[in-house]
Image (cartoon, rainbow, N blue to C red):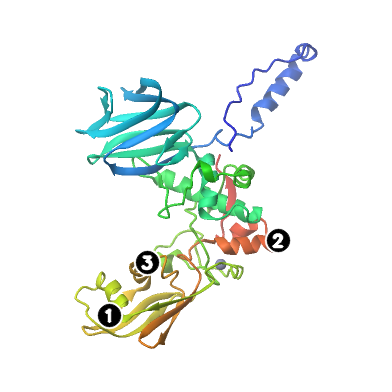
Amino acid sequence: MVPEPVFKTVFNPPSSIRNYPILLVIILIAFAVSPLPVLGESSPTVRLLLGQNLPRAVISGDSLLIEKLEEGIWQPVIGRVRMAGFSPWRAGVRLEGSHSEESLFRVKADKGMLQYAGLRRRGYLTVRNSSGGLMVVSHLPLESYLAGVVNGEIDSSWPLEAVKAQVVAARSYALYQMSRGSVYFDLKTDVTDQVYAGVHSEDVRALEAVEMTRGQVLYKDGELIQAFFHSSCGGSTTSSLDAWGVARPAHESVTCGTCQDAPYARWNLPLSAGEIVEAVQTLVPHLSSLRFMGIHKRSGDGRVKTLYLETGEGRVLVDAGEFRKQIGYRRLLSTRFALGKSGERIILTGTGYGHGVGLCQWGARGSASRGMDYRQILRKYYAGAEVRRAY
Ligand SMILES: [Zn+2]
């Protein structure tokens, strides 16, 4: 569990110190500059989108304080309630069971934690009307958020240096998104951004990795990098340019060689001609039959960039990333594959899981097991990047 930020200690010097004002000043300065072990302290606040276009939102807790924004100042509406229901009302939000209709509500817990959508929440929640439905956003310290990301992305029981590398990458990604987030939120809580598994997934190891790297992020040429990561690369990572057509600083292809223990290090996916036609139809309408599928182009690191299909309607080129999306990211695990045939079926034989850009999580685990520390691991996957404190 994260210790609550309650370090409002009154410094009451013993009489022997009261007689030595200079010493007292030195001690007070030392007290002021030494960081306290509280995750929320001096951490920026991140805004997580928990839901949008909702017909209703219910927030519960031991003792809730509900506030409304009036002329830029938060004003209490009601306090010490255990549950609050909200619904859209015209262009605003109605607090159910009251006459309060506002454009924005804030819900805090006087004690304990908030509960929303089955998970306990740190920080506070806001509820607003967005396009006719409700939008619920969680506001919490970035360091607390990171402790809840570790077990959503990897497993905190992995070697500590690998966990620390994941935390620094996740912090860099989050801080980058915070500097460019949308008007109302910075991050989503699923694989679109980073998988946030909430308070219940925090544990001692996750907190330790966050605390040991507090405020540390990745820079390249003085710029904060949007550090991407993925499960396993299957041998070498790929550049953002090859994967998405956009060159990102420190996201080049690098040799990994340490992710052989990943659960999807090697895989096979048999596909019928019908399944392939169905997937490609969303990209090339009016396609009816498949005669042959081959690889048109690979990237330098061996991933398929383009497939070519001989069809009843002629020859068609298909982007492999789009093909993977249409088949399903959890079925076609990566674009690093070869094609074979078994009877009527086309067999895709591949390695790795994920888009292959940035840090390879299972490779970081393997690197840590071979004695690399988190800075070395990060340098391995983010070419030319350096770890620095942002706060
Ligand atoms: Zn790898």
- Which is closer to the viewer, label 1 or label 3? 3
- Look at 41% across and 86% down and name the residue there: 341
- Look at 57% across and 63% down and name the residue there: 362
Q: Please tell me the numbered disc located at residue 328.
A: 3
Picture quadrant of residue 2: top right
Which one is nearer the viewer's eye here, 70 or 301?
70
Q: Secondary structure at mark 3?
A: loop
Which one is nearer the viewer's eye here, 120 or 28?
120
- Look at 21% across and 73% down and name the residue there: 285
Q: Residues within 10 Å of mark 2 (few under 14, many from 20)?
A: few
Q: Between marks 2 and 3, how big is the CA–CA gap?
A: 36 Å
Does residue 37 appear anywhere in the picture?
A: yes
Q: Determine whether, in the image, residue 281 is placed left or right of residue 390.
A: left
Above or below: residue 168 compared with residue 61 = below
Picture quadrant of residue 119: top left
Amino acid type shown at disc 1: Val
Q: Residues within 10 Å of mark 1 (few under 14, many from 20)?
A: some
Quarter, ligand 1: bottom right
Residue 299: image location, x then y, percent: 44, 75
Q: Which residue is tagged 2? A: 371
